[in-house]
Image (cartoon, helix red, strand yellow):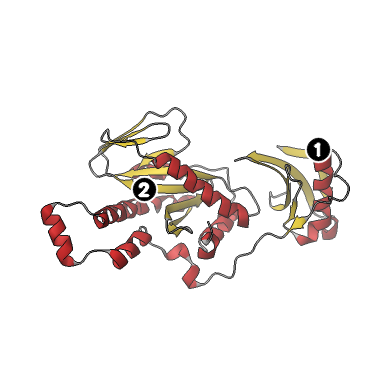
Amino acid sequence: MLLACWQRQCRSTGGSLELHVTRWKRYGHDRLYVNLPNGTAVGWADVTTGDITVLRAECRHDVIAMLTKYLQSLAGPVPPGRAPEARARPMLSPLTPADDLAGNPPGQSLRDLLAESGPGLVERVVSRLLRRPSEWGSWRKGLAGERRVGVELNRPGRHGWRVLHSVPLADKVDVDHLLIGPGGVSSINTKHHHKRSVWVGDDSVKVDHGKPAPYARKSRAEAKRVARVLERYCDFPAPVEPVLVFVGVTELKVVATQLSVRVYQERQVSALAPLSGVLTAEQVEQVYSVARHRQAWAQA
């Protein structure tokens, strides 16, 4: 919603830049953004707390004046002694090769796990002969699934999308894939169920009519963690959508009526490519520059 009644020239730039206030409500947030004509945010306010964040120092005076005036129109005058405070957005250190996640191949975390804790040759042979299930067997299957999805995620690149694999979170888990593009951000969770049938309900998944698995709930929680990181470092809203991708299944039946997670088979995941209208090309690159930095996820 564009609040055209609250416009003014940024005086510190010689009156050449007209500023606009827009209101943004999503994911439990209620914010007012001050934007340049091209949509770039120069500051924002939390409507609930009244806190103001200035993103462009040269427009500091105008940002605070505009947001203070509009906050007052929404909630009445600011109480005496409680002036809004401008906060500096945290900055990441310069990106080094060691912290750059862009080079991670699909399944990097599982590959490292197998290298560190995987079985020796004799144990692998014995387990295969006895057809004995093992934890490392599950890791290898997961690795194969992530590699197959990784191949499919290369396709949206020509539509302006960026992709990252094996993004590490703070508690020794990872996001299998992050897809960042004009349609927003997708947090992708890969599940490899070779030659199995999968049933997806509103909040549970069943493989071969087995016990319900909390795949959808975990995918939503993962997407929220990703959104918190991007919100901390980006100066604009970057919506994150949870996505479940099933690999190798014989049947995928989605019967949910209120499912908040996208569900695909691996060859369908390129359907995300035509989505647009959420992030500009400049914003895609800013989100990608944050997401590829390992230190951004250190406390995610």
What residue is drawn where x is 56% and y is 57%? 285
The secondary element bearing badge 1 is classed as: helix
- Give left or right: position of 160 versus 233: left
Q: Is residue 101 above or below residue 278?
A: below
**Label 2: element kind:** strand
Q: Is residue 216 left or right of residue 290?
A: left
Q: Which residue is mark 1?
A: 75
Residue 36 visible somewhere in the drawing: no
In the rendered image, residue 193, in percent from the top left (x then y), is placed at: 27, 44
The alpha-carbon separation of the residues under discs 1 and 2 comes to: 45 Å
The quadrant in which the N terminus is found is top right
Give above or below for 297 relative to 21. below
The quadrant in which residue 75 appears is top right
Amino acid type for the residue under numbered disc 2: Thr
Percent across and percent down for residue 258 are: 47, 29
Q: Residue at x 38, y 28 (%)?
A: 255
User: Which label is found at residue 190?
Assistant: 2
Horizontal relation, residue 227 to residue 141: left or right: right
